[in-house]
Amino acid sequence: MHMADALLSPEVGASFLAASLTALAIGARRLQASLQEDSQLVALMGVLGAFVFAAQMINFSIPGTGSSGHLGGGMLLAILLGPWAGLIVIASVLLVQALFFADGGLLAWGANVFNLGVVSCLILYPLIYCTLAGDGNSRTRVTLAAVLACTLSTTLGATGVALETAASGITRLPLPEFLTLMIPIHLAIGFVEGLVTAGVLAALAQRRGGFSGRPLQAGSRGIIASFILAALLTGGVLSWLASAHPDGLEWSIERLGATHLLEEAPVDALHRQSAQVQQITAILPDYELPAALPKAGIVAPGVSIAGIVGSLATLALVALVALILRRPSRRIK
Amino acid sequence: MAGLAHALSSIRRADSLAGRSTLASTIDARAKLLASLWVVGVLASFPSYEVASLLPLALFPVVLLVTGEVPLGWLCGRLLLALPFVLMVGMLNPWLDPSPMASPWGAPIAAGWFSLASILLRGLIAVSSALLLLATTGIIRIGYAMSALGLPAVLVNQVLFLYRYLFVVGEELARTVQAWQLRRAGKPRHGVPPHQLKLLLAAVLARTFQRAMRIHQAMLARGFDGQLRLPSAPRWHLRDTVFLLFWIAFPLLARLVDIPLTLGRLLTGA
């Protein structure tokens, strides 16, 4: 389940991009030393990334639901490669998916890396998988750890999508209903992913004579805790900026000395009614306006003849630019 | 399986598009990557009910489409696959948000229709921009651009490595699943049963590990010392500066001035 650009606000998108890039930068720095010591890791990361990318395209059936899902792969990568290498590999998979299949998008890449990579590799792998799996020699413990970690990872990833969508405020789908839609099916998908992951690890162990999960690198827990704190702070600070300070348009208008446009009262009955509805229903007034915007004089709410004519004219101009730039001499199949 | 085979053929198709020499492909990958991010960022900053004022931003994918000589059919096919989630999340807006908004024919329209249209338009522009960035640049040059812009070399190398072995590992997995399907004499209705999938994946994963070892040996034979190196950035031209500046300024203008409404007022005298 990928977050999409169309559902993200810039504040949420930028916060998650910053958090994920920070995690990736820390991961890259820590891996430099590992790569010097173990040059095999580069090749392993590359082919395992290709493997997870391909495995995500194979759907598995979810018993009893008539539905299907696919692997996320973040937990499997963390178990096989370690948390930092796993994070970098899943980030690369998500980037290739964003570019080739537009799964998610460019701005949403950070949110997706966070939901599918940071949550599984940096939070659930050390806190759940490593704790439950212990030294990784007991098949029962590894299976239990993989099932629980994958179930939580998939469910938290889907919860992340719902929370980011709600925080962005682009869609009106209420958070409780969105979560009700998302969580049950992702619990089932995560549970099956956990079983498949545990089965893959067991089959590999049979071939290789032992489980191959690498231990969490020393000192990682402290870094993870600082990282979570930094992510929360980043989100908090950006949210505060978003709510307490004027947005770019308001700032520009203030600079132009035209603040009366921002404060102008609704002028007609429809605007007044809309403003009243907004005052009653707004959960976060002045952060996101669920009702028609009353900022008359800046953006006219609704549709007007001028708006329709202007939209058609804009489309005609875009088409004209396309015609001018087109090279008729080359036909592409 | 069909999904995997289809995905691999889609990647090959995008690759063949990116490999051609077109006007868009002459622009530096860094300029295109930054411009795409900026356009998508500005697009996300519009209020949720805006529809018409987003239209000028469609110029970015249209320019890439035309100057990159990308077939419209390819783009439409990719868009159809990418938009269902966005549609699913936004489709209830008209019922969840019935606040009235003005219409030129008198009867008010539920505000949710505007936010739904806005979400779809945002999705179209953002998804097209990402797909066309790839189709006019290619993953290799995007990787080098990411490196030149300061992303960690480990991540960039990982992207390039993944891409290099995608077809080898992907085709192996596709063949394995196809062999399973043939023995099963029929396609499963809802995907591969989990207990069988784990065996299929484990078999391919074991071969993937063996392949990684062979690749590592080959890398060592070519002098790999654990250091990841990328080629230096290509030369930056004046046209790249012009392209980047234009695509920073134009979305900003579209964000600050409602271009369609201004045009409409000029044309109708309203």
Image: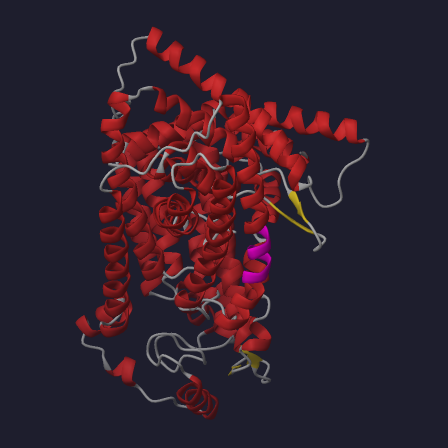
Say which residue appears at 29% left-offset and 51% top-offset.
Answer: A19
Q: Position of residue B48 (x, y in %)?
A: 44, 68
Q: Nearer the viewer, residue B11 or B3?
A: B3
Q: In the figure, is residue A242 to the left or right of A73?
A: left
User: Which residue reaches farthest top?
Assistant: B221
Q: Is residue A308 magenta?
A: no
Give, as a single range, the part of the protein colored magenta: A183-189
Q: Is residue A130 visible?
A: yes
Which image quarter holds the N terminus of chain B? top right
* Corner quadrant of residue B173: top right
x%, y% of residue B126? Answer: 46, 51
| Residue extending farthest right | B185
Q: Residue at x 62, y 31 (%)?
A: B199
Magenta region includes residue A187: yes
Residue B149 percent across, percent down from the top left: 26, 36
Q: What colour scheme governs how the chains and residues are painted in the rendered image of this protein?
A: secondary structure
Judged left or right of residue A6, residue B247 is left
Q: For the stretch drawn in magenta, what is the main secondary structure?
A: helix
The residue positioned 71% from the left and 54% from the top of the image is A64
